[in-house]
Each structure stands twice: as C-alpha cells, then as structure tokens.
Image (cartoon, rainbow, N blue to C red):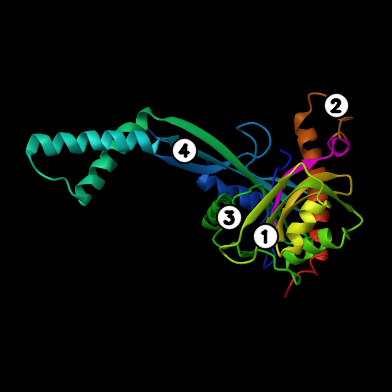
Amino acid sequence: MWFKNIRAYRLTSPFTITPEQLAGQLAERAFTPCAKSQALAIGWVPPLGGEDAELVHAAAGRMLVKLKREEKLLPSTVVRELLEEKVAEIEEGQARKVYRKERLNLKDEIIQDCLPRAFTRSTSVYAYIDTRANWVFVDAASANRAEELLNLLRECIGSFPVLLPQVNSAPVAVMTGWLLHRNLPQDFELGDECELREPGEEGGVVRCRGVDLLSEEVETHLHAGKQVARLSLGWDERLQLVLAEDLCLRRLKFADELMKENEDIAEGDDAARQDADFALMADAIGTLQERILTLFGGEAE
C-alpha cells in the first residue's frame, strides 16, 4: 500500500463530508467486473482489508480510497487484420468499394464480437484526502489516471474542487541552480539520474542515469543552456524519489528503517499493520509536500 508516486492537489475549500457519508456515496459506483461486451469498467473497492471491508479507510483526518480499473485487451493489430479481411471479402464478393463510414461500422462490429473472448487487465490507483491540511494525494505517475480518479469522485459526491499547486519559483530554474551552484538543500542528497532539456518545444533532451550529477559532463550541458526537468533525490534518509518540473514525485522508495517501524505489531493482525503503515506513510508524505513547496518559494496565491 506504500505509494509509488505522488500527484498532489490542493483542496480549494474544506472537505466536510464524513468518512461514513463518503463510503455511502462511493458505494453507488462500487467496482463491478467488465461484462462480456464491455471494454472498460472502473469503480471503488476497499483500500484495506478484504472484499467486505469499508470503501473508505479513515485515520487522523485522512480518508484513503482505492479505484479499480479493468479493461479488455484487444490488440489494434488483430482488429486491423480482421477488418481488412472483412473489407476484402465484401469488395470481392459484392464488387463494390467499402468507404469510411462502413469501415467504422465494421470495425465496431468486430470489436464487439471479440470483446467476450479478450483477456482482461486490472490496475488500481490509491488516493487519500487529508482534511486537516487540505490536500489530496494520488498514487499515479500519469495525470490521466489521477484525473480519472478525481472525476469519479466528483461524480459520486457532486463537487470536489481541487487545483494543482502553483509555486513562486520555477522548479526547473531552482533544480538547475542546485546542480550549477552545488547548493542542494541540507536535508536532500543527489541521486544518480536527471533529465536535462533545452528551452522551447523543439529543444533537445539529455537523460543521465548512473552518473555523478556534479560531473563536468553534466555541468557542460547546463552551461550550454539545458535545464533540469527531472532530478533523483534522497530526502532526510526517509525516502528516495524523482522530482519533476510539474512537482509530481515519481518512483518513491521509502527507507527500510521507516517501513520497519511497525514490525512490533503482532503477526496476523493485518488490519492494524496496514493502518499503522498508512499513518507512517501519510505523515512522511505530508511533511515532504510542505517541504517541496518551501523549496520553490512557497505556494503562490
């Protein structure tokens, strides 16, 4: 359950719905597997525990939820081949041309025919609402997956106003300065990966991995005008991460010492262990998020 990514959203008004009320509203869109002819199914499942657990796990003013996504895998190459076979059969058998509109209809028929036999793939996205600090944290590297979860929340509760946080100092400029001037904040340490980009839409991109980020090679790129778009960092000996220019935190790896803090919980008490792990993780994430905002000049009005 430890988050792998953090995409943070600022709540623009207090979240006053209780965990019990939220669970009731999410139940309206509880997950149901894909029907035979259905390409995609999304819905809420219990974030902790088994199938009969609550759809919302609440602790210390935080509400944890989990969105499940099931989709049928239907390769486009297979659909294309079947479509070309069908088109060729019609054109040869009826001595006429198959035009675009008919091709689209044939394609839809082929997809509907293949869906019941297609394999399915399931993925999940966790998120939690911090009602005390007015944050929503989504475990998604993709903006589309995060927005999918937020949109379904809006559908369930009617209104859910959130915004991506804006900062006063441009992240690319600040991160570039860390490397150029070797003035990384004291509670952070450099990793061995970065992504450097030239300004402008047509600018080149250099990705470095497994290198000394303070080396002459990287410095040369920076002096040539490239800027840091992504940077791997360690924070406070608590976790490793990749910080991006959009302030998304990717590839989180919590320190073993942190993850072992709840080892004294009795074996077999999975619910207590998961609850304690969630509290540990959420405390670390909340502290880190506020620290990130401070590094980039604070949150803009």
Q: Earlier in the sequence, mark 4 or mark 3?
A: 4
Identified by mark 3, the residue type is: Leu
User: What's the CA distance linking mark 4 and mark 2?
Assistant: 38 Å
Say which quarter of the image contains residue 50: top right
The mark found on residue 246 in the picture is: 1
Distance CA(mark 4)–CA(mark 3) = 19 Å
Asked if residue 29 is positioned above or below residue 222 in the image, the reply reads: above
> Residue tagged by mark 4?
71
20, 221: nearer the viewer: 221
Q: Position of residue 259 (x, y in %)?
A: 83, 36
Residue 212 forms part of the magenta stretch: no
The kind of secondary structure element at disc 3 is: helix
Q: Position of residue 186 (x, y in %)?
A: 92, 56
Amino acid identity at mark 4: Glu
Q: Residues within 10 Å of mark 3 (few under 14, many from 20)?
A: many
Q: Quadrant of the N terminus?
A: top right
Label 3 to label 1, Cα distance in Å? Answer: 18 Å
Marks 2 and 1, Cα distance to the nearest angstrom? Answer: 41 Å
In the picture of the structure, the residue carrying the numbered disc 3 is: 150
**Element type at mark 1:** loop
Q: Are marks 3 and 2 in contact (CB under 8 Å)?
A: no
- The residue singled out by tag 2 in the image is 266
Asked whether the beta carbons under mark 3 and mark 1 sit within 8 Å of each other, the answer is: no
